[in-house]
Amino acid sequence: MRYFIYAIIFISFFDLFTQLPIMSTFAESVGASTFLIGLAVGMYSFSNTFGNIISGFWTDRRGPFLVLLTGLFTTGLSLLLYYFIKEPVLLIIVRFVHGLVAGLIVPAAFTYLANITEKNKRGKGSAVSGAFVGIAAIAGPAFSGILASRTSVPFVFSITSMAMFLLGVIALFTLKKITFSKTEQQSEELDENKVTVGSFFKNTGIIKAFTGAFFLMFSQGVIAYLLPLRVQELGFDSKVTGTLLSTFGIVAVLVFLLPTNRIFDKIAPVYTLALGISLMGISQLLLSASVNIALLYGALACYGVGFGFLFPSINSLLIDSTSKEYRGKAYGYFYAFFSFGVVVGSSLLGWLALGIQEGFILTGIILLVFAFLTLLGNKSMLKSRQLHV
């Protein structure tokens, strides 16, 4: 059952990563201006934020089964809508719908996973789920880039759509067996009235998980924005960007899957979080100083190790700081911070009009400062891991 949830997580992130190399050119092909191309690319993350939050509230109220099922089938349908796009306005609408319904899947899936994972194995479980995210990050762009060049962008999305429908049908007959007991359902209804948005932001562990998710994807947004420009600035072929990103993904997956993943159950997640975000910050500084191909690969390998430590850590922090009754809502906000981080990371540096090296340096400093701040007040957090409302 656990590996079926991993498959859902994989295909959900695969859907996200397949969009990266093809959406800009697809928007251009239907007549979008430069502004509308940027809007089409960002609209998915914008509406996905709201989808994540809706998923969290709905999961706590009705359970993850119905939310997950709705997300899989509606996302499958939304992916088929790309066949009917002939003008930019329709593309913007479809991107909004796609991001909104896709946002339902991940919080519900991770809620399922957290609730069926033994507490003393939550770190390793988070690492394995992170591996599936990493594999999707490697396979998604390569799959869509190659297939779209030989067929079309809507055809690429239709393949993902079929996978969504297949997983939805399987989920209909398998995940329904996993239900809350009557006592837990009653507890949910009671806690639903007690747990407020403000209470999440009074718990140190949850705050660190949320901000960790934000800065992880903030950093990703910066990498997506600046790395191709840095590669071009140094005079390398654009294909180097793809291999650099693959290096980061492969290293991260190795951290997730090798016996090193046991460290996440033996060391408090706040320490592995600080280590992970520090390595990502150092890699950003290395990218600003790299002048040859070896240093670039070294920087991205360092980034992969940091990502590999950070992702399981923030998941473990969230699990440790919440109970089943409101974990769906917590994951909803958690992945909303993910989506918001991408938008801020890719747009802030453009708004500040910084140079490429300056952008990497600023990002590196921000990540290192955050790593230091995560260690402050750690003693009080360790004394009270659970959110009490």
Image (tube, helix red, strand yellow):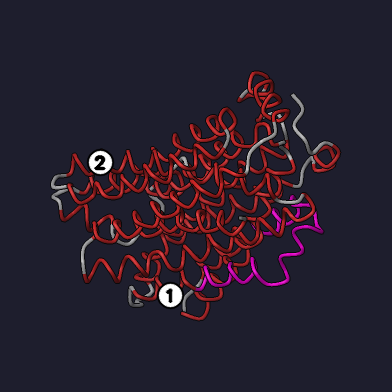
Kind of element beneath mark 1: helix
Q: Position of residue 279 (x, y in %)?
A: 64, 62
For the residues labelled 1 and 2, the Cα–Cα distance comes to 30 Å
Residue 292 appears in the rendering: yes
In the rendered structure, does residue 200 fall within the stretch colored magenta? no
Magenta stretch secondary structure, dominant: helix
Q: Residue at x 74, y 52 (%)?
A: 269
Front-most of 235 and 256?
256
Circle number at residue 243: 1
Name above or below for residue 48 compared with residue 54.
below
Kind of element beneath mark 2: helix
The residue where tag 2 is placed is 92
Earlier-in-chain disc, 1 versus 2: 2
Name above or below for residue 40 compared with residue 247.
above
Picture quadrant of residue 285: bottom right
Q: Amino acid at mark 1?
A: Thr
Q: Position of residue 59 (x, y in %)?
A: 56, 34
The boundaries of the magenta stretch are 247-276
Q: Amino acid at mark 2?
A: Ile
Name above or below for residue 121 compared with residue 78.
below
Q: Position of residue 35 (x, y in %)?
A: 23, 44
Front-most of 201 and 64?
64
